[in-house]
Image: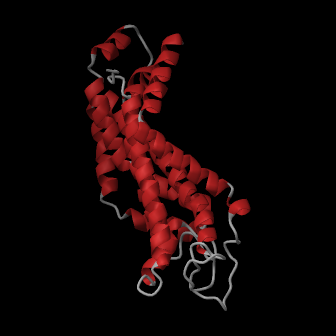
Amino acid sequence: MSKNSSLWSDAIYRLTRNKAAMIGGGILIGLIACALLAPWIAPYSYSYQDLDLGASPPSSDHLLGTDILGRDLLSRILYGARVSLLVGFVATGVALVIGVSWGIIAGFFGGRIDSIMMRIVDILYGLPFIIFVILLMVIFGSNLWLLFGAIGAVEWLTMSRIVRGQVIGLKNQEFVLAAKAMGVSNFSMFKRHLLPNILGPIAVYATLTIPQVMLLESFLSFLGLGIQPPMSSWGTLIKDGVESMEEYGWLLIYPGLTFTITLFALNFFGDGLRDALDPKTTDN
């Protein structure tokens, strides 16, 4: 237990020394806090409309301006953060659970099991998964949690291949062979020996999957199968901004800037996690 605690303590120590990762983590914490506190810190409701005002540039009353329906853009960005971050983290979590489990099993057992499991992945890669998500939404209705699960269920394929490759490289290492010789169960092998050694690539890919999931959600919302008006997400705000960028540039600039900052923060924090969780990392 003390050894495991020491490994985690070393990882936290390495992470805190990475300034870029700390800045990225701080930005993410700030965004999450803003999303959680949106009902209290947003100057207006996300559905409040001033039709007489229409689209107006930033002012003292509306710090980031308003959209073509007179809705405060800052408020809609804050409320949109709740949807975008939630769909990003929840759907990515679903993809990680499925992909990591599938990849570890396929890579560790190898042989026929590996061949069958990876052929299934190859077949699924060839299917139009956006059609699969659309069918789910049409059959079961536009449910927010179903949307999260459906997106996560189609984003696990690449993760399974990444994990499989890492496990194949690890399963013939001396410490794994020694654990096998000592009679360690497969579950304990996965939990104590394989998973800690592949957390780095998993963390990096997860940080790249979150913005990808956000964009997929915006595409579904564009088709009328995702977030429904007047509720907003960053993806729908960017889509609306693109449609009117020539006349009202601020409608694209501010949501796009928010999304870009989030993307950089996720990348910096993911790189820091990879370095911190890599067992081969040593301090100079």
x, y percent for residue 95: 46, 48
Q: Nearer the viewer, residue 99 or 239?
A: 239
The residue located at (70%, 69%) in the rendering is: 43
Asked which colour scheme the image uses, the reply is secondary structure
In this rendering, the answer to whether 183 lies above or below 253 is: above
Q: Residue furthest top?
A: 182
Which residue of the protein is positioned furthest toward the front in this rendering?
60
Query: Percent x, y for residue 169?
Result: 26, 28
Q: Nearer the viewer, residue 28 or 4?
A: 28
- 101 over 94 or under it: above or below: above
Which residue sits furthest bottom? 52
Occupied quadrant, residue 284: top left
Tell me which corner region of the image, top left, top right, bottom left or bottom right, holds residue 79: bottom right
Name the residue at the right extreme. Answer: 40
Could you tell me which quadrant the N terminus lies in?
top right
10 vs 74, left or right, is left
Q: Is residue 194 left or right of residue 166?
A: right
In front here: 266 or 221?
Answer: 266
Where does residue 187 sit, x and y in percent of width and height? 47, 23
Q: How many numbered marks, from 0 up?
A: 0
The residue shown at (59%, 80%) is 66
Q: Residue at x 46, y 19 (%)?
A: 7
Q: Is residue 183 visible?
A: yes
Question: Is residue 154 visible to the viewer in this orientation of the structure?
Answer: no
Q: Quadrant of residue 167?
A: top left
> What percent of the width, then of the height, locates residue 44?
70, 72
Q: Is 160 positioned to the left or the right of 44 in the image?
A: left
